[in-house]
Amino acid sequence: MEQYAIKGGNPLVGEVEIGGAKNAALGVLAAAIMTDDTVIVDNLPDVRDINVLMNAMESIGVVINRTDRHTVKINGSMIHGFVIEDEFIKKIRASYYLLGALLGKYKHGEVALPGGCNIGSRKIDLHIKGFKALGAEVKIEHGLIIAKAEKLKGAHIYLDTVSVGATINIMLAAVLAEGKTVIENAAKEPHVVDVANFLNSMGANIKGAGTDVVRITGVPRLHATEYSIIPDQIEAGTFMLAAAITKGDVTVKNVIPKHLESTSAKLIEMGCQIEESDDAVRVVASRRLESTQVKTLPYPGFPTDMQPQISVALALAQGTSIVTESIFDNRFKYVDELAKMGSDIKVEGNTAIIAGVKHFTSANLTAPDLRAGAALVLACLTAEGFSTVEDIKYIERGYEDFHIKLQGLGAQIDKVESDKDLQKFKFKVG
Ligand code: EPZ
């Protein structure tokens, strides 16, 4: 089984190029099937979640031509089915964006009910509430969510909880509906804005994306476009934390610094120096980090997708920190793994009380999910000696060439498949 082999102890130094945002790309790809014209999408990250979504799209007749590693041509004129099977939804929850896209375009979509994911209960009630408000009949049968409508009509929808997925899915269903839709208490994440910008470039009429209130005026059809996905704020944030955790000096390039403000602010509180330019952020950590308080919140608050990475940094900081996870109810699963390295973290409900230790010891760890997996890799990079991280399939869901980018910053890390490979790695790095 593939795992990362890591020899820790080196500060990470240098520059790293950030790819396109996975969570924006998932919405954009689903939206691309809503026209019969050919759409070109660029700056697509080559990660598993994206590839699974494209397989799901191909399973219903979408024609996808990958012109290079990060560019695809998509044509949705030959869609012959409206059912997204279990196999895809089990692998990625975001296949449910195809429900909004199919419902919007064909007034009929069916996707398998997303199962519980390993970061906590992840409901879909707000997506369904939105579709119903637009006039769809939505029922759950044989494990499928079936959404059908004679026609969709704009509506006023209030989201009880700020939800990225529901905001994007309702936007998808509403762009071709008759009349005006208003989504109140909408998510403001950069990827919501990116999907809206993409739809607008196809002829949709969406205003207010990035604020609490998104207003959509239905249009009769969407057309061809060429679009480049925004940079991935979470990949960027992960490398910023890599610099902080290893006491390094890393410049993350091809980013939108505004999207990283909550992470930059916390790093400054923790004693790092941050330098921003137009499309890059440099993080320098020259001394032991200081403790702080973190609470995850919808954008522009501190992202839940950065919670494990900052917690690893705080586990090495001077003093005691409190981290409150307010979005998902099971996002501290890495804590038991980190304990194997000598960390001192107590979890009580949605709060982690982190007493900083001076250093971690090497250990063999298992990635419990995508972001926690990345955070554990960063932990291993600080520990003297050899560590391994198993179940890296989770990390590969959302990070393109993670170990190669880390190698570029001086990390001693490799992907190994067997004990023999592991021995070779140990021999190579000494
Ligand atoms: C998106 O998930 C991201 N995924 C997640 O990224 C991210 O952690 C999350 O937003 C929060 O930023 C994608 O974009 C594909 P939500 P999503 O709906 O849309 C509750 C990663 O690591 N809720 O904003 O599923 C829900 O239980 C992943 O890249 C309802 O109550 O998240 C949660 O508490 C993991 N009813 C809160 O809203 C609903 O119908 C926010 O969830 C929907 C959600």
Image (spheres, grey):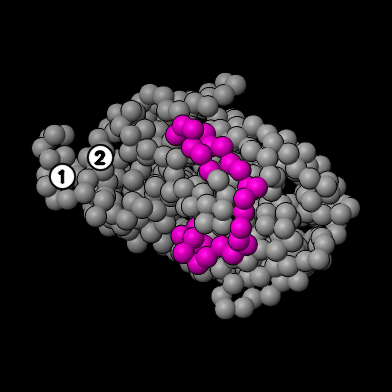
Work out whether residue 23 or residue 247 is closer to the camera in this orientation and state it: 23
Element marked by disc 2 = strand
Query: Where is residue 68 shown, x and y percent of the image?
Result: 46, 32
Dot 2 beta carbon under 8 Å from ligand 1: no
| Secondary element at image label 1 | helix
Q: Is residue 222 left or right of residue 245?
A: right
Which residues are the magenta region?
Answer: 64-92
Name the residue carrying label 2. 414
Decide if residue 105 is on the left or right side of residue 422.
right
Which image quarter holds the C terminus?
top left
Is the C-beta separation of discs 1 and 2 under 8 Å?
A: yes
Q: Identify the amino acid type marked 1.
A: Asp
| Nearer-the-camera pick, 377 or 24 | 24
**What residue is shown at x 43% (from left), y 48% (from top)?**
48
Question: How far across and down, in percent of the image, does residue 347 sit?
Answer: 45, 64
Location of residue 103 (image quadrant): bottom right
Asked if residue 201 is among those painted magenta in the image, a careful observer would answer no
